[in-house]
Image: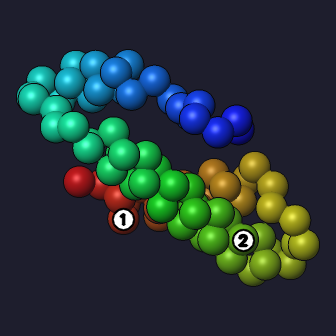
Amino acid sequence: MAPGKKSYPRATLRKILRAHSRKKVGKGVDSLVYLDYVLFIEELMQNATRKARVDGEKTIAAKDIRKATMTSLRRFKG
């Protein structure tokens, strides 16, 4: 990514969050949502890696991610 370029339109993300929560959205909330997303994806991949190793596989497949999704979602549910 080029320096000075934003990775996502902050205003659009704020509008989406406002529409789903029906509440006021603070200035830094989009950054917090992004960080939470990154943590979720990291945990999802760790869980999928564990499931793949238990099954004796060397690579992660879509089925491993599907198996790990519910575990990761439970942890990040608000």
Quadrant location of the C terminus?
A: bottom left
Q: For the residue labelled by badge 2, is the local secondary structure a helix, a strand or a loop?
A: helix
**To which quarter of the image does residue 16 belong?**
top left
Q: Identity of the amino acid at label 1?
A: Arg
Label 2 belongs to which residue? 49
Label 1 belongs to which residue? 75
Q: Is 26 in front, or is 70?
A: 26
The tag earlier along the polypeptide, 1 or 2, is: 2
Quadrant location of the N terminus?
A: top right
Q: Is 57 in front, or is 18?
A: 18
The residue sitting at the right extreme is 58
Q: Is 65 in front, or is 6?
A: 6
Q: Can residue 37 be seen in this snapshot?
A: yes
Q: Quick check: 57 left or right of 14?
A: right
How packed is label 2: few (under 14 Cα within 10 Å), some, or many (20 or more)? many
How packed is label 1: few (under 14 Cα within 10 Å), some, or many (20 or more)? few
What x and y, as percent, mark residue 58?
Answer: 90, 72
Residue 17: numbered disc: none
